[in-house]
Amino acid sequence: MTSAASGCAECGREPARAPRQMPHGNVCFKCLRRVHYHPAKCHACGQTRPLGYRDSAGEPVCARCAGHPSVFACAECGSEAHPYGASRCARCFLKQRLADTLRDPATGQVRAELAPLFDAMVASHRPQNALTWLTRPPGHGVALLGEMARGEAAISHSTFEALPSDKTRNYLRDLLVSCGVLPVYQPQIARAEAWLEQIAAARPDHHKAVVTRFGRWAEFRRLRANASRGPLSNATVNAARARVNAAVKLMDWAEQLGKAVTQLTQTDLERYLNEHPGRRWAVYPFVAWLADTRANPRLSLRPREPPQPQVTIPDEERWRAVETLLRDDTVKLYARVAGLFAILFAQPLCGIVAMTASQVAAAPGGEVLVRFGATAIEMPPPIDRLVTEHAAARGHASYNAQDNGWLFPGGVPGRPMATENIRRELAERGIGCHEHRKTALFALAGAIPSPVLADLIGIAPKTAVKWAALASRDWAAYIAERADPAL
C-alpha cells in the first residue's frame, strides 16, 4: 500500500489536497473528480461507470467488479451518475432545491398543481441543467415559480401576460406548458401579439384599429394556421412581423400627408413606391388586404410572379458536402443528420426539426427506416448508423422537462430545435442547406417519377412536377405506363 506521504497513484504528483485512500494507493481529488466526471465502459461487466479501481491485472474496473464499495456513489441514493457535490449527486440536490422552491406553506409539501413540474424536472436526463436554471441570476422565472407555489401568483397564462416578458419568465411558461401544468399555447404568436399591441399603441386612433386588424386577422391568423400543421420557424414569424412593419411605414407616411391610410389614392401609393422602391413587395400584402376588406378599394398592386425553381450549385459540390457530413466528427451529430436529410433527401430544415422519433424505425432485418412522406425510406450505410446514434442520444442533447417525441429536441421545453442552430453549424463548414437542397431536388426529380418523388419526400405534387420540368423530364405518362399490364 502506498504511504500517505507519497504521490497520487493515478497521476504521480504530490496531492494538493487530502487524498482518498483507494485499494491501489492514495488518489488525489483532481484524479477522483476526473474519473467520476468521465465514466467509461468497464471491460469486466460492460457497464459504463467510473473506473476508479483496479483488478488483479492492474486494469481499471468499476467498484462492483473490484468488490469494493464505491467512493463515487451518492450518499443519499447510491447512484454514481450525475456528479455534483462532494457526497450527493445532482439529482438529489435538485430534489431538495426544487422541493424548497415549490413548497406550499399550507401543507409543507410540493404544491399539488406543480407536482407534474417537480416530477418532470427531477426525472430529466441532465439534472445539472435544471440546477443551473434554478440558481442562475437574475432568476425572475424562479422567483415567479416560488410565488406560484406559495399562492401569491395565479398558475395561469394571465399571470405571465400581466408581467414584462423576459427570457427566464418565457422559459418558465414554456416549461409549465410542456409538463401539462398550463394549457398549450403558441409562444411565438403570443409574443408577436404583445409586440403588435405596442406598435398599435404608438399610432393615432384611425391607424391603430387598422394595424391591429391587419396584424391580428391577416398575418397572425396565417401564423396560427401554420402552427396547427407544425412548429413555426423564427423566419416565418419574423416575415409576418416585417409585413406589419411595412404596413406601419406606409401609415406613417400617410400621416405626414395629413391622411389616413384608408384615404390614400392610387396616385399617393405610386408616389410612395417611387420614393421607397425597395418596399414594393413588402407592402403588397397590406395593400391587397386593404382592397379585399374594402378598407381602401382604390389601391391596387400587381402581385409578384412566383419564382421558378433554379439550381445555383453543381452536384459535385453537394456530394462534397455529403462527404464532409459523413466523415467529419467535429460537426455536431444533430447537424450531421439534419444536413444529410436536407442535401440527400431534399428535406427543408423547418420540416426536419418538426420530425418526431416515431418517424425513425428499425426493420426486422436491422435496416433503419426513416419516413419523410407517406413511404419510409431505408437509410444506406453509414447514414443508418448516424441516424441510430442521434435517435438514441436525442433525449440527452439538452434539458427538456419531458420526452415530447421530437427527433431534434430544443433547449426550450416542449419545442423542437430552432432551425437557426442547425443552419449556423452547417454554414461554418460552408454548407448552405437551402442551396444544396435545391440541387438535391433537381437530381431526384430527374431520376424519380414526380408522383413517387412527392410520396417519398413529402412535397406537394405540383412542386415535384415543377422540378421535373426543370430537370427536363416529363413523367406525365408514368401512371398510365405503370397501370399497363404489358409493361
Image (cartoon, rainbow, N blue to C red):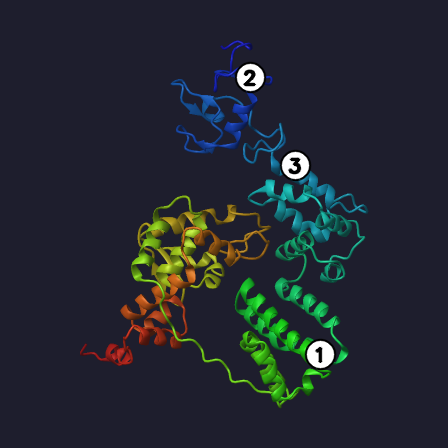
C-alpha distance separating marks 1 and 2: 77 Å
From the viewer's perspective, tell me whether residue 393 is left or right of residue 414.
left
Q: Earlier in the sequence, mark 3 or mark 1?
A: 3
Residue found at the very far bottom of the displayed protein: 298
Residue assigned mark 2: 15
Q: Earlier in the sequence, mark 2 or mark 3?
A: 2
27 to 2, vertically: above or below: below
Residue assigned mark 1: 256
Mark 2 residue type: Pro
- Residue 477 position, x and y percent, is 26, 80
Q: Nearer the viewer, residue 324 or 256?
A: 256
User: What SS does tag 3 mark?
Assistant: helix
- Residue at horizontal 50 percent and vertical 58 percent from the top: 419
C-alpha distance separating marks 3 and 1: 61 Å
- Residue at horizontal 28 percent and vertical 75 percent from the top: 472
257 to 411, vertically: above or below: below
Mark 1 residue type: Gln
Q: Earlier in the sequence, mark 1 or mark 2?
A: 2
User: Can the viewer see residue 70?
Assistant: no
